[in-house]
Image (cartoon, rainbow, N blue to C red):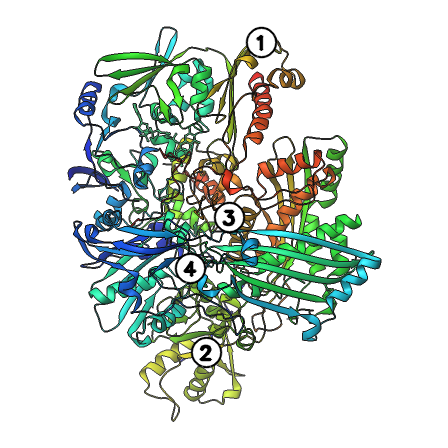
Amino acid sequence: MIPAAFDYHAPTSVEEALRLLAESGDDVKVLAGGQSLLPVLKLRLAAPEVVVDLGRIDALRGVREDGEALVIGAMTPHHEVASDPLVQQHALLLREATRTVADPQVRHRGTFGGALAHADPAGDLLAPCLALDAEFVIAGQGGTRTVAAADFFQDYFTTAIDDGEILTEVRVPKHTGWRAHYEKFSRVAQQWSIVAIAVTLRSEGGTISEARVALTNMGTVPIRATAAEQALAGVAATPEAVAQAVAGIAEGTEPPSDLNGDADYRRHLATVLARRAVLAAAG
Amino acid sequence: MTAVDETTTAPAAEIGSPRKRKEDQRLITGRTRYTDNITLPGMLHLGMVRSPLAHATITGIHTDDAKASPGVVAVYTGADLAAAHGSLPNAWPVTPDQKAPEHHAVAVDRVAFAGEIVAVVVARSPREARDATELVEVDYDDLEPVLDLEAAAAGPPYAHPDLGTNESATWIFDSAEAGTGSDVEAAIDQARGDGVVIERTYRQQRLIPAFMEPRSTVVDPTSEQITMWSATQVPHILRLMLALTCNISESKLRVIAPDVGGGFGGKLQVTPEEVTTLLVANRLGKPVKYTETRSESLVAGHHGRDQVQRLTLSATKEGIVTGLKVDLLANMGAYLGLVTSGVPVLGAFMYNSIYKFPAYRFTCHNIFTNLTWTDAYRGAGRPEATFAIERLMDDLAAELQMDPIELRRKNWIRHEEFPFTTVAGLEYDSGNYEAATDKALELFGYDELRSEQQRRRESNDPVQLGIGTSTFTEMCGLAPSRVLGSLAYGAGGWENAQVRMLPSGKVEVVTGASAHGQGHETAWSQIVADRLGVAFEDVEVLHGDTQVSVKGLDTYGSRSLSVGGIAVVKAADKVIEKARHVAAHLMEASEDDLEFSGGRFSVKGTDKGMAIGEIALAVFAAHNLPDGMEPTLDSDATYDPVNFSFPHGTHLAAMEVDTETGAVKLRKYVCVDDVGIVVNPLIVEGQVHGGLVQGIAQALFEEAVYDDQGTLVTGSFVDYLVPSAADVPDFITDRTETPSTTNPLGVKGVGEAGTIASTPAIVNGVLDAIRHLGVQDLTMPCTPSRVWQALQSREQGEPASVQPTNPEQTSGNLNSSGVISPEQGPRTEGGAS
Amino acid sequence: MTRITMTVDGVSYTDDVENRTLLVQYLREQLGKTGTVVGCDTTNCGACTVHLDGRSVKSCTVLAVQADGHEVRTVEGLATDGELAPIQQAFHDCHALQCGFCTPGMMMQSLDLLAENPDPTDEEIREGLEGNMCRCTGYQNIVKAVRQAAGTGAQS
Ligand SMILES: Cc1cc2nc3c(=O)[nH]c(=O)nc-3n(C[C@H](O)[C@H](O)[C@H](O)COP(=O)(O)OP(=O)(O)OC[C@H]3O[C@@H](n4cnc5c(N)ncnc54)[C@H](O)[C@@H]3O)c2cc1C
Ligand code: FES
Ligand code: FES
């Protein structure tokens, strides 16, 4: 319950933050909403010497439009993302998924960027970002680079963000008017996803014209179900047709085995939930 | 003296009224006094170094770095403290030859479970204590941990090599030997020939009480008496046991249970942490505080349940039960706590439940393992028994293709048969199972739900519906002292109360039953207000401090009202008798001519009368009292119950099972409980709701799981799933009222009813939904993956039941708790706050 | 040590704190605001819930230094001049507490959910309280209390 002692900085600009990170040596941690980092510190599973808090950098917070993209600042709290009208309009899937994260208190503090940088394979924002082809803007001493979602999530709790770098914003191509559903399966409300399926799609007259599907907690990183996406295009939104299109969605995946179920169970769940998610999204 | 006002009517009866609670005011405004809120000048703080290993020899402890750490005052190992105390107490040697290991507050040369304390850091602040725990290095030599209950029963290896066995005790009750029934083997043999025999093995998973307030202890040694504040359910027992264990005169020790944030049996203990805090404070002469973290609480506070139940039930083909044989393995864990060994024995009398079994045999093997020790958890022994018998009754009904309610009707004690002596030798004083069941069926809409179930089966609906039944009884109001004596329990079962009339007319009630959320302050006020005819607001209830409530046996086993409440009644009655004496004297009347009602003594046939408050003032002044009378009305009473009380009820659960995912949903829950006369329906209903959720959680969510090294995998609330509001529905609760005939209030006890009854109702409901698909059994908690797997095995033609998840499959418990290194197990080697 | 200034229940405080001090530790240990309690170390139980700039947060998962310059409201700031706030009255009326340990956090979260949704359904109330554990009440009376408070405009 008591973190080890650390030095604390609260820069007010990204430049200052980057400088502090560079000066602080190896043992430094970026603090966003703290909803993942502080529990880790309290249990002393990590004990950084320096903590750089991004909470006072106003520029990192908020949702805006930039041409064909929706830009979400890394420090935008979950509850703002979930209630933002632009997100609802252009990236409904993010809203649906964000609403299932943790509980209201955690959603008030936890941030969009923090959840993605943390990259817990059971995290609920990873698969939606992958499904939406989001791009991650990462700032470092040498400048800024943009990484595609497919390259951003590298492993268990590992992303393309290097030491000394900061995720500043996420650019999400607008999926204006797309329907969406995030089907999360857990045993109690506050629990992380055992498996979840992120779906966003367009449909006309009961037929799916285009779909994006990705899987949460079915491996060390989120998984894009491209085969299912292709199979869904042009399919009538009926239980039978959708079930057939997503039947192979778990093939080749290597989900974890734990108290909540083994890999086989998760693969089975993914198939059932995918059908339900697509049907729910298709309305 | 005032004349009787003819228009005065007795105040409305308090007993039975839904009074809002007195104790709420401080709790809703944050003016609370939980132990951890207490700060004293110069107070020092403890940090515990705990073993990460389940079984190991301690070969060295290095404390120099910790001692040199800023703010550290001292570091103690087990060797430093061992001489200052004896083995931690077990008050219930269930057999004369019961085996138990020596239990030090801080391990001396061997640790027997992961989480056991190996060293204690004392520092000026919680932060400094926590920092220094990281600096204590302990060398261990691994010993083979004993983790599996069934393997342990066969042993070796042994959890305590010195004992040469893992069996602590074997306790047997046999109705033929006791003369309370016939021979069970004969009944089973007979049924094998011409009846039905149901043989089952059920698993009571390990649970964690998970009271919301972590345990905390403050000890102030700076006075003639040492004062301990502790988050405990049992201040009186704790005081006595600490005095005996630490060789301190009982009269030099004062124990206070201030506001206590829940207990559920989990704070019915004399803990290593309490002993350590006392010893350290005593040694250093300074106030000392220790507050555990939730992680420490989950790993080191005692656990509950954890039994394997091997059961054989025999019946005729018509569904009349003829015999019941129970063979238990009960996991003690590493040590015997206060009543660890007695918990399974408490269940012995309840397996036959409300049914008329002619033959019964109960055998229990108490087994040691290298896991956290178990002890009382809400219901203690009785939920296990109720679960077993209610599951068996449903299984029998299924076997005979009979409606489960009908089957129960055929076998239960009919209301006109009370009092009834059971095959386990208890005399049930009263009950009306028919009435409670009829009311429950009506509220539930039983027939409609049965038709819906049929429709869903026929249409092969992916969501199947099941109805679970549980008609339970329990013995509560622990307990007649002679019964406890016959069971070799180390104390009695009486309770003490004092009623003090203050000169201002206010009343102080002192109770030995210490509350931690149950609402004694309100209920006792209601009882006394009625009895003495004073206003509810004018009664103040004092408890939880051994210097205020000097005598008592505290709160557990749903005993508060049916034992402690009766003591209050008896004390109040004594006050009235003394007051009557004075009233007669002051009004110059004969005592026989006095009537007491509505708080007034009046002289029959006259308009003369005196209120009890007036008499109290007169006694205080003591100017004019009957000759030889002591100038006091204050009275105390110690009540030893003549029998247990036997609340009962019928619980019905409608469960939906999603056969595609295995997900289980509780759709509707109805319970009709009979807890006798109700003092405060609001409080009773609250107790039932809370109990239901704990029982439902055992059926569906909670399980303490260890890995193959003996490390607790469910070491935080991330993995030990306590349901939130979003995970349970509203319940439909109702009551029937069959007064208990063995106490003057007719009350029975309600604290454990919900927990005891709901677990089997839920599991029976889940099974009822999928039994037709070939699933015979499910291991608790009925997680979606277990339900799904049971459905799969059935399809593959395997026996359709599932075993507990293999702990080896579990990943790090902190995966997705936001912890960066999920491979890392729960942290057990430190933590000051 | 870092110097921080914070308004808590309407009073401004300036103190030196260790960087690692959690907001709840600052409230309890330095300000004596022991009405807010700690029930876990993994941000699950919600017992420590307070309002930070008007929104509910788990004060065990906020650093005191993060709250520098901000406004905090705890259970101790609910009643005014000895008059219970509607949410407190509702918890009392509906017997929504037993041991009371979860109650401060429950009430603070209930207020937040009512601010967001002044007329919630039972299901919305239950979901809004998903981050708060209670081991005593079984939640039914808590839901009832929130419903009652909604009727009395407790969100203000
Ligand atoms: C009880 C509970 C339940 C939860 N349930 C869920 C759930 O169901 N689903 C879910 O998705 N999440 C869940 N979470 C996690 C929650 O979403 C967190 O908010 C999120 O994972 C981390 O966000 P944060 O802003 O709090 O980041 P922090 O905790 O501050 O940081 C997390 C990690 O990311 C790094 N980091 C943060 N921001 C940046 C940045 N901009 N650049 C570089 N590195 C950065 C930090 O250094 C740290 O290592 C839960 C958390 C809790 C406490
Ligand atoms: S103390 Fe449990 S969430 Fe804060
Ligand atoms: S009232 Fe005890 S935890 Fe909620």
User: Whole-Å distance between the Cαs marked 3 and 4?
Assistant: 20 Å
The yes-or-no answer for disc 2 within 8 Å of ligand 3 is: no
User: Whole-Å distance between the Cαs marked 2 and 1?
Assistant: 81 Å
The yes-or-no answer for disc 1 within 8 Å of ligand 1 is: no
User: Whole-Å distance between the Cαs marked 1 and 4?
Assistant: 60 Å
The x, y position of residue A68, in whole percent, is: 39, 6
Q: In this view, does C15 lie to the left or right of B806?
A: left
Disc 3 and disc 4 in contact, CB within 8 angstroms: no
- SS label for mark 4: loop
Among the 4 quarters of the image, the one containing residue C73: top left
- In this figure, which residue is indicated by the disc labeled 4? B267
**Residue B177 makes an appearance in the image:** yes
User: Whole-Å distance between the Cαs marked 2 and 3?
Assistant: 35 Å
**Can marks 1 and 4 be said to lie on one chain?**
no
User: Whole-Å distance between the Cαs marked 4 and 2?
Assistant: 26 Å
**Can marks 1 and 3 be said to lie on one chain?**
no
Q: Which of B549 and A242 is in front in this view?
A: A242
* Amino acid bearing label 4: Lys
**Numbered label attached to residue B637:** 2
- In this figure, which residue is indicated by the disc labeled 1? A233
The x, y position of residue A1, in whole percent, is: 31, 44
Query: Given the image, what chain letter belongs to the residue carrying mark 1?
Result: A
- SS label for mark 3: loop
